[in-house]
Image: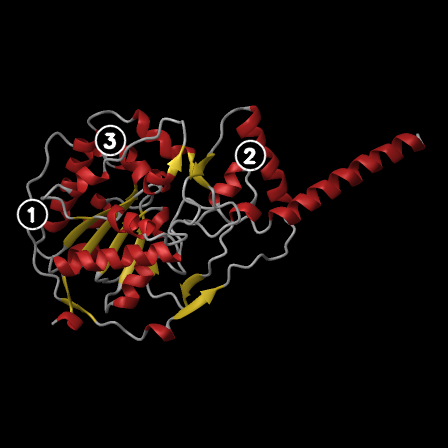
Amino acid sequence: MKKYAYLQLCIYSVSLLAITSLGIYLQPLSGDLTRIGGFSENNFRPFENQQILAKTLSDFDNYDQYYDVVILGDSFSQSRSYGWQQWLAMRSSLSVTTLHINKWSISKLIEHPVFINTPPQLVIFETAERNMEKRLARNEKSSCSEFSKTSIFNKVIVNPDKQKLLTVLPAEKTFNIDYEQAVSFFRANYRSHIQNKPRTISLELENTNLFSNNKSNAILVLKKDFKKLKWPADILDKSLCTLKNFQHNVQKNGTTWFVSMIAPDKLTAYLPYINSDKNLPNTFLNKMHEDEELQIVDLLTPIKNALEREEKDIYSPNDSHWSSRGHKLVADSLLAYLVKNNIVFDKNKD
C-alpha cells in the first residue's frame, strides 16, 4: 500500500513539475496563433516594442450620443490601447466610437434614434478578409443600389501634440505560471498532430527580416485563412453588391459618408514571401479596390509596401492581427484616403 501511494505521489510530482516547467516556458502566451495552435511563445513573441496611447481617445460599445465617426468592426477594430481608430482620433479632431460587428448591423445602426436625429458624418465598415463570405456574400440582395452622393464631411485634421499622448509598452517576458495555458498547449498539439485538425498553420518564410521574433524564418497563420480556396466564384460580385447597398443605405440621408475597409488576412499580406508546397489562396482585394463606385480604403497596398521595405511586425508574429505599427499604418492609409477624396481636410496642406 505504501509503495502504491509512493508511486502515485511520484507520478503526481513529476506531472506537476512538467506542467509547471511548461507553464513557465510558455509565458506570456499572449498571441492568438500561439495560444490556439500549441506553438511556443518563446519562439514567436515579438521583440519590437509596442507604441501605445497613454489614454483611450475613442469610445467602444457605446452609441448613446452624437459621434463624428461610427465604426462597425470586428477583432481588427477592438484594440483599445493602440487600435487604428485610436490613431485616427489622435491625428484629428474627430469623436469616434467603435461598435462590434457581431452585435451591430448597418440596418440596426441607421434605424437607431441617435443616427436618425444626429447622424454621424462618417460610418466605417471594417471586416476581416476571411469573413467576407459570411458577412458580405451571404447578405447580398437581388440587386445592387446605385451610387449615392453625400455632403462634404467638413472636418479638419488638427494634428495634436503626439508626444503627450504616446507611451511605449516594452516587449518583455513576464514571469507568471499559468497551468491552464500549459494544459491548453497539450490540447492544441493533440488537436493538430493526433486529430490532424490544426487551427494554426506554420509556413516557411523566404525573407527572415519581416518579424522580430526568435523564429523569424517561419510565419504563423490561421487555418481559416485558407477558406478562400473553397469560396464560390461569385463571391466578389456578391460582396461588392452588399457593400454598395450598405453605402447607399448609409449615405441616402445626404449627410453621412460611408467607407469600407477590408483587413487583409495575414496569409494574404505575406504571401509573396512564403515558401510552401501547399495550395495557397489568392485574394479578391485588388479587384475590390478597382471598383470606382465603391468607397473602399486600399489597405493591402500600403501593407505590401511596408513589407517590401522590410518593416518588422506589421502583423504580430504570434498573432493574426496587426501590431501597433500595423494599426498606425492602417490609420495613416485611412486618413490619406479621406483627405484625397475631400472627405476631411488637412490644414497642413492648405
Q: Quadrant of residue 180?
A: top right
User: Around disc 1, counting alpha carbons within 10 Å, would you say few (fewer than 14), some (14 to 19), or many (20 or more)?
Assistant: some
* Protein image colouring: secondary structure
The residue type indicated by label 1 comes to Ser
Q: Which of disc 3 and disc 1 is earlier in sequence?
A: 3
Residue drawn at (32%, 53%) of the image: 309
Instruction: Give the side of residue 254 with respect to residue 209, left or right.
Output: left
Q: Which of disc 3 and disc 2 is earlier in sequence?
A: 3
The percent coordinates of residue 220 (x first, y second) are: 45, 40
Quarter of the picture holding the N terminus: top right
The percent coordinates of residue 250 (x first, y second) are: 15, 49
Do the residues under discs 1 and 3 have CB atoms within 8 angstroms? no
Q: Looking at the image, can residue 106 be seen?
A: yes
Instruction: Identify residue for label 1.
Output: 148
Q: Which of disc 2 and disc 1 is earlier in sequence?
A: 1
Instruction: Identify residue for label 2.
Output: 188
Rendered position, 262 above or below 254: above
User: Around disc 2, counting alpha carbons within 10 Å, would you say few (fewer than 14), some (14 to 19), or many (20 or more)?
Assistant: many
Instruction: Give the side of residue 61 with respect to residue 337, left or right.
Output: right
Do the residues under discs 2 and 3 have CB atoms within 8 angstroms? no
Secondary structure at numbered mark 1: loop
Rendered position, 328 above or below 265: below
Which residue in the rendered view is the most extreme toward the right?
Answer: 2
User: Around disc 3, counting alpha carbons within 10 Å, would you say few (fewer than 14), some (14 to 19), or many (20 or more)?
Assistant: few
Q: Looking at the image, can residue 62 be seen?
A: no
The residue type indicated by label 3 comes to Arg
Instruction: Identify residue for label 3.
Output: 138
Distance of label 1 from label 2 (alpha carbons): 48 Å
The residue type indicated by label 2 comes to Ala
